[in-house]
Amino acid sequence: MKTIFITGASSGIGKEISLKFLSNGYKVVAASRRIELLEKIKSENENGINYLPYKLDLSDFIKAGAILKKITTENEIDTLVNNAGTTTFTSASEDSVEKIKNIIDINLLGSILAIKSVLPKMMNKNSGTIINILSVVTEKIFTKSSVYSASKAGLLAYTNVLREEVRTNNIKIINVIPGATKTPIWHPKAIEKNSERMMSPKEMASVIYEMHSLNGIMVPEQLTLRPIQGDL
Ligand SMILES: NC(=O)c1ccc[n+]([C@@H]2O[C@H](COP(=O)([O-])OP(=O)(O)OC[C@H]3O[C@@H](n4cnc5c(N)ncnc54)[C@H](OP(=O)(O)O)[C@@H]3O)[C@@H](O)[C@H]2O)c1
């Protein structure tokens, strides 16, 4: 049984990716701060035995390192999905240093820590897949998203370099670049106003599953997913 480790599995895109892989016979290592939500998913799912919740706060560098070590010691991770993420919809001049640090810690540093935790075993066994959930902010300028954009562009740059370094280790690096998707990261009023123009996290999970299922020597290195009507 193949094992997929998903960060930010308690809601939105991460939750739907977890459910998709779980229902397709994967062991799912699901991590986020709200362990009670992960436990609920486990207890309510018919394949709950293969769903392993871990409480993980990526904003706490030291504690996160210890949990990541526990996860990779207790499980043979075939695929990592760096999905946990946060943002503020505020201007650069309004952002406090604490907010800035929090976003960089979770979105960029947290993802790099997760990669570092799975990489040695993947390199040893000459196989593995790392999927990063980035954002269209890496392709286009959105105001009130300066730190978020920096964090996602930083992870894109980091993993583009990493990809070249691990090609000979048969490790796939897939960067997913989604546009507006209906999840709790948005204010409910924004969803209410733009609902018709926002993608479904469930459909996104299906696309990611199909992309991950490709066999052979071909890998989709980068995939942009936008609503047909474009960005909000
Ligand atoms: N929705 C969109 O329009 C959109 C577009 C482009 C990209 N994305 C990206 O998609 C990813 C998933 O977001 P979403 O839209 O599905 O939003 P979401 O429903 O708010 O999910 C965010 C997830 O990240 C986790 N998380 C937040 N802070 C964390 C921390 N300190 N440590 C560990 N986990 C943490 C949350 O879990 P806990 O609160 O339980 O920790 C939650 O499971 C993010 O990286 C986001 O940037 C979203």
Image (cartoon, helix red, strand yellow):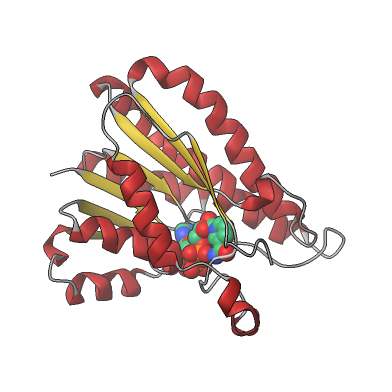
- Horizontal and vertical percent for residue 203? 40, 63
Q: Position of residue 100 (x, y in %)?
A: 71, 55
Residue 95 in the image, given as x and y percentages of width and height = 79, 62
Residue 96, above or below 107: below
Q: Residue furthest front?
A: 228
Query: Residue visible at 39% across and 47% down?
Result: 81
Name the quadrant containing residue 123. top left
Can residue 135 be seen in the rendering of this structure? yes
The quarter holding residue 205 reads bottom left
Q: Residue at x 48, y 25 (%)?
A: 163
Indicate whether 43 appears above or below 193.
above
In this rendering, does residue 85 appear at all? Answer: no
Q: Position of residue 69 (x, y in %)?
A: 33, 41
The residue located at (64%, 51%) in the rendering is: 136
Relative to 213, is 164 above or below? above
- Quadrant showing the C terminus: bottom right
Please state the total of marks drawn on the protein image: 0
